[in-house]
Image (spheres, rainbow, N blue to C red):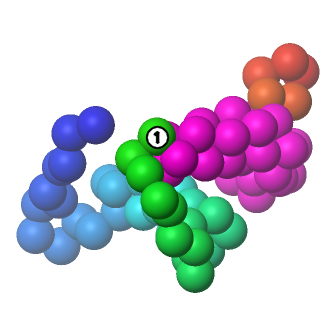
Amino acid sequence: MIHSFPAKGHPYNNIVMECFFKYLKKEETNRRSYSSLDELKISLFKYIFGFYNSTRPHSNNGDPSPNDFENL
């Protein structure tokens, strides 16, 4: 990922990533501690590929999960 800085007065070009990280923190990493980097990596992998892309509804594409939307 490459961090982009919006032009002055245009704060919305990072909205997708900001939204993703908001829900990642809220639904997965908040109030959890990890004993190793590998445990964190496994947790993130399970969240992204096991829940976020396959189960979690996304209002941006009419509420199906990203995987369901791609299959349509």
Residue closest to the far front: 35
For residue 18, above or below residue 40 = below
Q: Which residue appears at 86% of the width and 44% of the height?
A: 55
Query: Predominant secondary structure in magenta?
Result: helix
Residue drawn at point x = 17 percent, y = 59 percent: 6
**68 in relation to 9, above or below:** above
Q: Please identify the residue farthest to the bottom as the structure is shown.
A: 31
> Residue 58 at x, y = what percent?
75, 52
**65 in magenta:** yes
Asked if the stretch drawn in magenta spans residue 50, the answer is yes
Q: Nearer the viewer, residue 52 or 11?
A: 52
From what the image shows, is residue 42 above or below residue 70? below
Instruction: For residue 9, say whether it is visible.
Output: yes
Relative image position of residue 47 (x, y in whole percent): 67, 47
Say which element carries label 1. Answer: helix
Residue at image position (49%, 50%) is 40
Which residues lie in the magenta part? 39-66
Of residue 5 and residue 67, the one placed in the foreground of this image is: 67
Q: Is residue 61 visible?
A: no
Amino acid residing under circle 1 = Asp
Q: Nearer the viewer, residue 8 or 55?
A: 55
Along the viewing direction, whichever of 24 and 39 lies nearer the viewer: 39
> Mark 1 sits on what residue?
38
User: How many neighbours does mark 1 have within 10 angstroms: few (below 14), some (14-19), or many (20 or more)?
Assistant: few
Which quarter of the rendering shows the N terminus?
Answer: top left
Residue sitting at the far top = 71
**Which quadrant of the structure image shows residue 48?**
top right
Give coordinates of residue 14: x percent, y percent.
Answer: 34, 56
